[in-house]
């Protein structure tokens, strides 16, 4: 105001802007003198105030009052030491404010980090160093021990690499290089083709300071993603990945994992899948009006690096023979005379023989339970309640076989269907609890190789009446009942379809209610 009114605006802001070294802009000078901006450096401000003081002195105004109310003179207003003191005081205030803001930010970050650690500590599935995980824990099938070899523990034969294994190793090594964005690798192959073994061997390319997390189910994976447990330098292990994506939470899991793959830092997802499973997750709906239940999963697997495993060792037999000289498991597999060594190692043919050539008093009844399990699995039921197996089995037996059954036939049938084959696997197996130790009571699952064998050999067979009626009585999931109802309807078993849709409605399936209402509106 003094410069504008008493000095008639002289020197001008434009002239003052050229006085400091380096020069400042005219607008900056005006902002300083009006108190709208604090200079970052004191020296340019003192030069400008000095030029105004020279102008006031040349006009003889230094001793005149600037403002009648305060009594301050121009000399006092333009005193350099006063401007210096005021600037330094303001700087101290601002430094304290910035320091306080920084301290608050650090405190907030520390609190957020503490909360993140607490969330991770509460997880059922946590990351652990990658070298801590054994191949058995990561899902590799135990192998046959070989003729004349008494082995009671986990048998892991000599690894015979194929070209796909070299490609897998290269992909994993490249995904762990510094500066690479998160990667997703899928090992695809039929049952017992060595998918999981290939993926496990490729972990040798992962640096030792990486962690690995193996969630038990979709809920565990979502919890880990929500707790920010999949940080940089982490491997997410998804063996039998359809368990995470083919269910009510599947698309939410895929969406959350897509967001993590869009993040920063070294991060690797390794998944194993059967070909038909990945096709089901990525196939488009039959019509544009039909909404895909796996929309996010399709986007997720579209960006994956895929490794397809062959069914046999046809092109690598010489390497197998060389390794079999010192490996009893491989030697026993070669004795089968076939090229599907991984299936033999996992006792696949013996499982089929146990099912198709039942022996002993209860063999035929155990084979019936396995047939029920095959039909149930190919219609979408992964876990088999024992009451369902018992009630469905009579339809798979002849009148004579049923009439000759002893009172304890079901106990004997279960013993046969759960027999340990070549000290390796069982046709019907325990289902591990989602978390904690021990099996889920009252349910079993079908061995992987028999799942595939059932789809190959029973695809054209329609389950008998006892199967549908047992499902309506003993299944409790609305989704499972609706799947079976759809299957019965597709096979022309309309009465059983109506029975199952009604059971699904009682179990809380809204979709089944709509389908059942439409079916009852159709004219007979």
Image: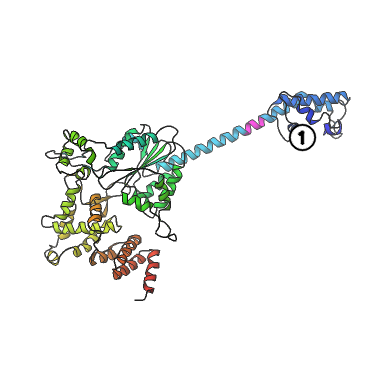
48 with respect to 318 (left or right): right
Residue 415 makes an appearance in the image: no
Instruction: Please state, as top left, top right, bottom left or bottom right, where the N terminus lies in the image.
Output: top right
Q: Badge 1: few (under 14), some or many (20 or more) residues near its Cα, within 10 Å? A: few
Q: Residue placed farthest to the right in the image? A: 60
Residue shown at 41%/52% (left/top)? Answer: 251
Residue 70 at what x, y percent from top left? Answer: 83, 33
Residue 238 at what x, y percent from top left? Answer: 34, 44
Residue shown at 79%/28% (left/top)? Answer: 15
Residue shown at 76%/33% (left/top)? Answer: 30
160 with respect to 55 (left or right): left
| Res 402 quadrant in image | bottom left
453 or 437, nearer to the observer: 453
Instruction: Please state, as top left, top right, bottom left or bottom right, where the C terminus lies in the image.
Output: bottom left
| Res 511 quadrant in image | bottom left
Residue underneath mark 1: 34
Q: Does the magenta stretch include residue 93?
A: yes
What colour-coding does the image apply? Answer: rainbow
106 or 475, nearer to the observer: 475
Q: Residue placed farthest to the front in the image? A: 315
Residue 346 at what x, y percent from top left? Answer: 21, 44
The vertical placement of 131 against 502, above or below, is above
Residue shown at 84%/28% (left/top)? Answer: 74
Range of residues picked out in magenta: 92-97
Q: How many marks?
A: 1
Secondary structure predominantly adopted by residues drawn in magenta:
helix
27 or 132, nearer to the observer: 27
Residue 522 makes an appearance in the image: yes
Residue 455 at what x, y percent from top left? Answer: 25, 55
């Amino acid at each position: 105001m003094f410069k504008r009114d008493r000095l008639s605006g002289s020197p001008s802001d434009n002239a003052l802007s050229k006085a400091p070294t380096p020069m400042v802009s005219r607008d900056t000078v005006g902002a300083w003198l009006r108190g709208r901006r604090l200079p970052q450096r004191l020296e340019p401000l003192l030069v400008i105030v000095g030029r105004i003081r020279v102008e006031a002195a040349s006009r003889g105004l230094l001793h005149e009052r600037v403002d009648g109310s305060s009594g301050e003179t121009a000399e006092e207003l333009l005193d350099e030491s006063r401007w210096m003191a005021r600037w330094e005081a303001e700087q101290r205030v601002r430094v304290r404010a910035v320091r306080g803001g920084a301290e608050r930010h650090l405190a907030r970050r520390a609190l957020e980090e503490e909360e993140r650690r607490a969330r991770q500590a509460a997880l059922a599935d946590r990351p652990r160093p990658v070298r801590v995980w054994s191949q058995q824990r990561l899902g590799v099938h135990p192998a046959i021990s070989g003729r004349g070899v008494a082995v009671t523990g986990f048998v892991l034969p000599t690894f015979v690499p194929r070209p796909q294994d070299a490609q897998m190793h290269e992909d994993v090594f490249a995904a762990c290089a510094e500066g690479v964005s998160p990667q997703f690798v899928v090992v695809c192959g039929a049952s017992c083709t060595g998918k999981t073994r290939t993926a496990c061997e490729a972990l040798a390319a992962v640096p030792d300071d990486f962690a690995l997390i193996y969630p038990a189910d979709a809920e565990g994976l979502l919890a880990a993603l929500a707790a920010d447990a999949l940080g940089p330098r982490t491997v997410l292990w998804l063996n039998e990945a359809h368990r995470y994506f083919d269910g009510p939470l599947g698309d939410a899991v895929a969406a959350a994992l897509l967001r993590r793959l869009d993040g920063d830092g070294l991060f690797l997802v390794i998944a194993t899948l059967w070909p038909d499973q990945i096709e089901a997750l990525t196939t488009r709906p039959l019509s544009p009006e039909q909404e895909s239940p796996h929309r996010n999963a399709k986007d997720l697997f579209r960006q994956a690096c895929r490794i397809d495993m062959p069914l046999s060792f046809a092109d690598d037999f010489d390497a197998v023979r060389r390794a079999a000289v010192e490996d009893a498991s491989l030697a026993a597999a070669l004795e089968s005379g076939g090229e599907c060594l991984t299936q033999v190692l996992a006792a696949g043919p013996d499982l089929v023989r146990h099912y198709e050539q039942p022996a002993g008093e209860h063999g035929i009844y155990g084979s019936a339970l396995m047939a029920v399990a095959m039909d149930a699995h190919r219609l979408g039921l992964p876990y088999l309640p024992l009451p369902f197996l018992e009630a469905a089995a009579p339809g798979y037996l002849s009148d004579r076989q049923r009439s000759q059954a002893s009172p304890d036939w079901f106990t004997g049938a279960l013993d046969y269907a759960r027999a340990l084959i070549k000290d390796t696997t069982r046709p019907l197996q325990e289902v591990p609890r989602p978390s904690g130790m021990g099996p889920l009571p009252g349910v079993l699952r079908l061995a992987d190789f028999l799942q595939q064998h059932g789809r190959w050999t029973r695809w054209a067979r329609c389950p008998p009446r006892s199967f549908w009626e047992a499902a309506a009585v003993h299944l409790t999931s609305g989704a499972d009942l609706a799947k079976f109802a759809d299957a019965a309807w597709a096979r022309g078993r309309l009465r059983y379809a109506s029975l199952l849709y009604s059971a699904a409605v009682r179990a809380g399936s809204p979709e089944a209610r709509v389908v059942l209402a439409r079916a009852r509106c159709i004219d007979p």
